[in-house]
Image (cartoon, grey):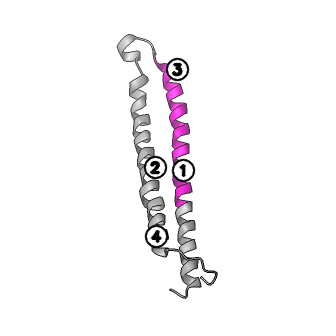
Amino acid sequence: MGDGFTVQVENLDKIATILGIEMAGGLEMARRNLTLAMEAEVRGFDTANTCGYHLFQLLGREFRETTDFMQQVLEDNRDNLQLAAAAVREVAKRYREADGQR
């Protein structure tokens, strides 16, 4: 750009890829694994068949509430990383346009 400030646009592209694909993808994988744990939870906290009463019923409720909250946190952070990646891509695009590229 004309103000003497320079940037490596290729590095911005790399950062956007890391944010949008690698980091957001990792959070999505963690969210999916948490979902699998929640599905298995029903069997894990139901002890009525083995001991005649629901020994861990209250703990199961706490587990569900906590995992629901964690899923929301993971989803929000995944979405924020994807938005950050889009913002970095936009910055790179504007630098290219300002330099007369593409």
Image coordinates for residue 6, horizontal then vertical, percent: 55, 77
Q: Which residue corresponds to mark 2?
A: 27
Q: CA distance from mark 1 to mark 3?
A: 29 Å
What is the span of residues highlighted in magenta in the rendered image? Answer: 56-83
Q: Residue placed at 44% from the left, 35% from the top?
A: 38
Q: Nearer the viewer, residue 54 or 59?
A: 59
Callout 3 amino acid: Leu
State whether residue 21 is above or below residue 91: above
- Where does residue 13 sit, x and y in percent of width and height? 47, 70
Residue 74: within the magenta? yes
The residue lying at 46 percent from left, 70 percent from top is 11
Tag 2–tag 1 contact (CB < 8 Å): yes
Q: Residue sitting at 55 percent across and 88 percent down?
A: 100
Q: 14 or 4: nearer the eye? A: 4
Q: Which residue is mark 4?
A: 11
Q: How many marks?
A: 4
Crowding at dot 2, Cα within 10 Å, few <14 / some 14-19 / many 20+, comes out as many
Q: Main secondary structure of the magenta part?
A: helix
Which callout, 2 or 1, points at the residue further toward the start of the chain? 2
For marks 4 and 2, give the CA distance. 23 Å
What amino acid is at disc 2?
Answer: Leu
Front position among marks 3 and 4: 4
Identify which amino acid the numbered label 4 is placed on: Asn
Query: Residue 77: which disc?
Result: 1
Extreme-top residue of the structure: 52
The answer for how far apart the CA atoms under marks 4 and 1 are is 22 Å
Q: Secondary structure at mark 2?
A: helix
Which residue occupies the foreground of this view, 8 or 17? Answer: 8
Going by the picture, which residue comes out furthest to the left?
Answer: 50
